[in-house]
Amino acid sequence: MMEREQSIDRFQHLLAHDTLPKIPDVKITAIVLSYNEAIRLPHFIEHHAALGVGHFIVVDNGSTDETAEILDADERVTRLYTTKPYSENKAAWREAIADLFCVGKWVLFVDVDELLLYPGWPDIDLARYCALLEGRNEDALFTTMVDMYPDRPLSQVQYECGTPFLDVAPYFDTGNYRLIPLEPKAQKLWPTPHYRVFGGARERLFANEEDRKSGLLEKIVTKTVFSLGRSNLRPSKRRQNLDAKAIAFIKEGKQKLSPPTMSKVPLMRWQKGTQFPGGPHRVNKPYAMSEDWGALLHFKYFDDFGPRSKEAVDRAQHAAGAAHYKLYVGGLDSIENQSLRFSGSRRFKSTKDLVSAGLMRVSAPTQRVLKK
């Protein structure tokens, strides 16, 4: 009883809510943080409700658009309004909500500009997929983050509320992602997962010119040691030593292992006391990770990309004083007036496209189930 009272106190303090909301008892709950995302909310909710998400708990962080009207009109949603700073509370909000309402249950941590895909989508729903994981004593799913974009400059894009995101931005990068193991000290603090993914369209479009430069040997190391094709099993001591040498080698060169991290652990059977370093990119507890990989299709590149990036710079609520958003603002002219596509672009048609690009994985046990 004392633990629950502490969880209630923490929840009420962090979200400035005097009363406790009534949350339905469902198998899968989505916990979402949102600020002025009204234009994306309808399709975001419909996509994940169709997957099998039973309820959405949305932290409305002081939105000034139609977010409140959209969420309050939807019985599948509990909206929690707060104006506390996002940068200081984003991890704690997720943790406090999950600790109070979702212990032992499946939780989806996903942003409004993201759509979850998993092995078997769309033929099996998310509840059945989670049951497959439970049957193998797996309680967390690793996903890549795959930036999606249109086939034309953003100045020619007009997204209308409710339109399926993929109708507007169906392309993604291939061949420019890399899988990087965490250094030993970081693995002790954040044991799940022990690797991250970097690269993709955002790095291609917005990395500093100096960060893009790499010699031939560096390119070879990136394509081999850090290939997405390597096993996702915990590496041996020999493997860890090789990884450490490769990381040190690249750090000495011009290529930097810099954010943004293009991977998350968005789906997990929640253990009380789990913590995030910020976003749900890794956690402080040793969850049993699935051999499968899912994917979060990420839809930043609509016609609101410029205004939202400038607003993010002004709010300064994102990492490093919104440093990445400053890069986006600096590169707006090129992406608003030139196509985002390049030789490695691929149009998404099904999850098979992501699997063949190394951005999703379907384990042998899952393949056997899907073939039945």
Image (cartoon, rainbow, N blue to C red):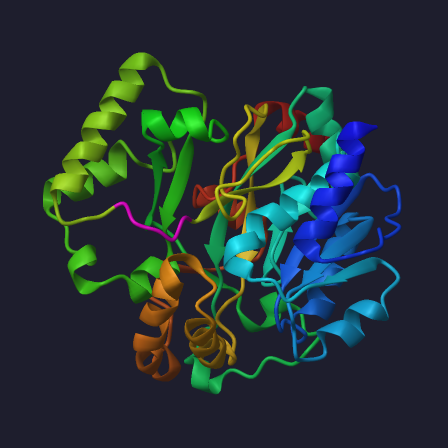
Residue 164 on image: x %, y %: 66, 69
Q: Which image quarter holds the C terminus? A: top right
Measuring 67% from the left and 80% from the top, which residue is drawn there? 65
- Residue 47, by quadrant, is bottom right
| First to last magenta residue range | 257-261
**Closer to us: 356 or 99:** 99
Q: Is residue 247 visible?
A: yes
At 38% from the left and 71% from the top, the residue drawn is 340
Q: Is residue 294 left or right of residue 342?
A: right
In the image, 271 versus 225, the foreground residue is 271
- In the image: residue 73, left or right of residue 201: right
Q: Position of residue 69 (x, y in %)?
A: 79, 76
Q: Can you say whether 341 is above or below 4 in the image? A: below
Q: Residue furthest top?
A: 237
Looking at the picture, how far across and down is residue 234, in whole percent? 43, 20
SS majority, magenta? loop
Query: Is 98 situated above or below 75?
Result: above
- Residue 167 vertical placement versus 232 (above, below): below
Q: Residue sitting at 32 percent across and 66 percent down?
A: 205
Question: Is residue 124 shown to the viewer in this render?
Answer: no
